[in-house]
Structures are given as C-alpha cells and as structure tokens.
Image (cartoon, rainbow, N blue to C red):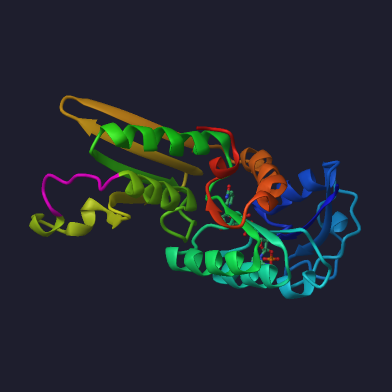
Amino acid sequence: MTIKVCLAGATGWAGSALAKAIHAADDMELVGGVSRTHAGRALGEVLPDVENILILQATAAEALKTPCDVFVEYTQPAVALQNILLALEAGAHVVVGTSGLTDEDYRTINQAATSKGLGVLAAGNFAMTAVLLQKFAEMAARYIPHCEIIDYAGAGKADVPSGTVRELAQRLGRVRKSMLDVPLEAIQGPVETRGARLNETQVHAVRLPGYVLSAEVIFGLPDQKLILRHEAGASAEPYVAGALLAIRKVNSFTGLRRGLDAVMDMQ
Ligand SMILES: NC(=O)c1ccc[n+]([C@@H]2O[C@H](COP(=O)([O-])OP(=O)(O)OC[C@H]3O[C@@H](n4cnc5c(N)ncnc54)[C@H](OP(=O)(O)O)[C@@H]3O)[C@@H](O)[C@H]2O)c1
C-alpha cells in the first residue's frame, strides 16, 4: 500500500533531503508540500534533481486540503504545534522532526492524537548514532548518579537546547534526578554558569561557528568518567532513513511517542 505523505518544510535543509527520499521510495507518494517562499511552484522546480510536479502551498491548512496518510512537520517551532493539530484534525498521523516544542505542547499533541485515535511520532533527532546515544545514556544513568549534558550547535541556531538534548534530558530525568553535590542554591558565583536544570539534569548549550550539531553526556564517578557523544556532519543525510522509518511506522500506535527507538526493535 502506498503511504500518502504531506511534508511541511519540503524545501528546507532537512525537508528537501527527505522530500527526495520520499519521492524515490516505492511505498510512498508525496501528495502535499509546504513552503512560503516557493508556494505556487512545483517541487521539481525548486529541487532540480527531483522530477516532481507537486505544487507547494504556503500553509499546512492549504496543503492538507489534499488528503494524506502521514503529515511530516519539518518547519520551525513557531508554527509546528498549529500544523500538527491541523493535521490531526484532518485525520493524518504525524511525524514531528521540528525541534523546540515544549513539554506542554507535547501534552496537547498527545491529547489530540489520542482523542482522534491517531499516532504521532516525535523525534528530536532521526540519526542512528543519536538514537543510540539516548539508549546508552539511559543505561548509564541507571548506574551513575552524576551526569551533565552539553549541547553543541552552530552560532545561528536559535532554539536552546536542541531537540536532541531536550529529549535526552527528558529521558534521563525519567531514570533519575542527576545528583548535585553542591545544591544550586548554595552555589557561590553566577548560578547560570552551572547550566539550566532541565528535567532534573544540568544542561549546558554552546552556540559557536564551527559546530554543526553534537550532544554529549558526561557521567562522573570518583576517579573515572564515561563520555558519550553524538556528532553530526553538515549534510542532512543522517536524518533521512530514520524519518522514512517513522513515516512507515507511525500508523502502528495511538497517541504520542517520542524518540525513534519507540518504533525500533531496540530493547
Ligand atoms: N529531528 C531531526 O532529526 C532533525 C534534523 C534536522 C533538523 N531538525 C529540525 O527541523 C526543523 C527544520 O530544520 P531545517 O534546518 O530544515 O530548517 P530550514 O532549512 O529553515 O527549513 C524550514 C522549512 O520550513 C519552511 N517553513 C518555515 N517556516 C514556515 C512557515 N511559517 N510556514 C510554512 N513553511 C515554513 C521553510 O520554507 P519557507 O521559509 O520558504 O517557508 C523551509 O522549507 C528545525 O526545528 C530543526 O531543528 C530536526
């Protein structure tokens, strides 16, 4: 059966790589695409190596007038929640690649998806090495009470921390509170230098030219450390296979699931 896909952000850095892969996949058909800049143009005009006559729309609401099985959100946090809710309202399962949504947004999404009997799969990072980082870090947190997360990205990345690190902090928080020998209220000096406490874990964000996207968790025990680090290069290629898997699997459950491993056999 062919999966009909609508892709919001089809001309973006991550979305265009995914658009090409969906176009090339035998079991998928791109029936909708969203981009404000290129609205009214065919996808194939914007992405020259894709022979696709799909006309891009300026909004998700316009694109969703064509029925789809799966809506993929790959735009920006300011419009992501609204797009996702519109897609659920239209009866589509949703794959969320956009980062920067809050826990409150995800509660709203879960409620909407559950009441509609649809699935939403949200992954801050579809790359295999990032998925493994999340799993290995959860495992380490069961044994090591002290850990801190460092989020590295280019100077222009506005959302803080990255979706990858938000998800990582949330997962580690479910395992345990990271231990602080000096409580934050007893810190001498600017408390911000200790990072932000997110889901009961300390998170530090670095934004500098020269970085693309990396996430690191440092676990500390007396006289020993474990450092787990995922590093992505400059292309959007690492995210494509995971996003395709999410599109194929998102109809297999109801409500919100977070992290690609939710649909992978990885226990
Ligand atoms: N989960 C993952 O594995 C993963 C991987 C990479 C990136 N991301 C996340 O995915 C999101 C997109 O990243 P990116 O680097 O691809 O960004 P990007 O290059 O800026 O692309 C954004 C895309 O969304 C469209 N868009 C933006 N705002 C819109 C709006 N208000 N209405 C309609 N279309 C809109 C843009 O087209 P127009 O500007 O022409 O409208 C463009 O096609 C970010 O949140 C990023 O952190 C996640």
Q: Which residues are magenta?
A: 176-183
Q: Return the x and y of residue 89 as percentages of the image width and height.
A: 68, 73
**Residue 102 shows up from this direction:** yes
Judge from the rendering whether residue 258 lies leftward or rightward of residue 94; answer left or right. Answer: left
Residue in front for this viewpoint, 61 or 53: 61
Q: Using the image as rendered, state which of residue 110 and residue 172 is in the foreground.
A: 110
The reply to whether residue 208 is visible in this rendering is no
Against 137, residue 185 (above or below) is below
Residue 78, picture quadrant: bottom right
The residue positioned 66% from the left and 59% from the top of the image is 94
**Residue at the location (51% across, 70% down)?**
108
Tell which quarter ligand 1 is in.
bottom right
Q: Is residue 216 left or right of residue 116?
A: left
- Looking at the image, residue 137 sits to the left or right of residue 10; the answer is left
Residue 179 is a magenta residue? yes
Residue positioned 81% across, 57% down in the render = 46
Name the side, left or right, on which 227 lies relative to 116: left
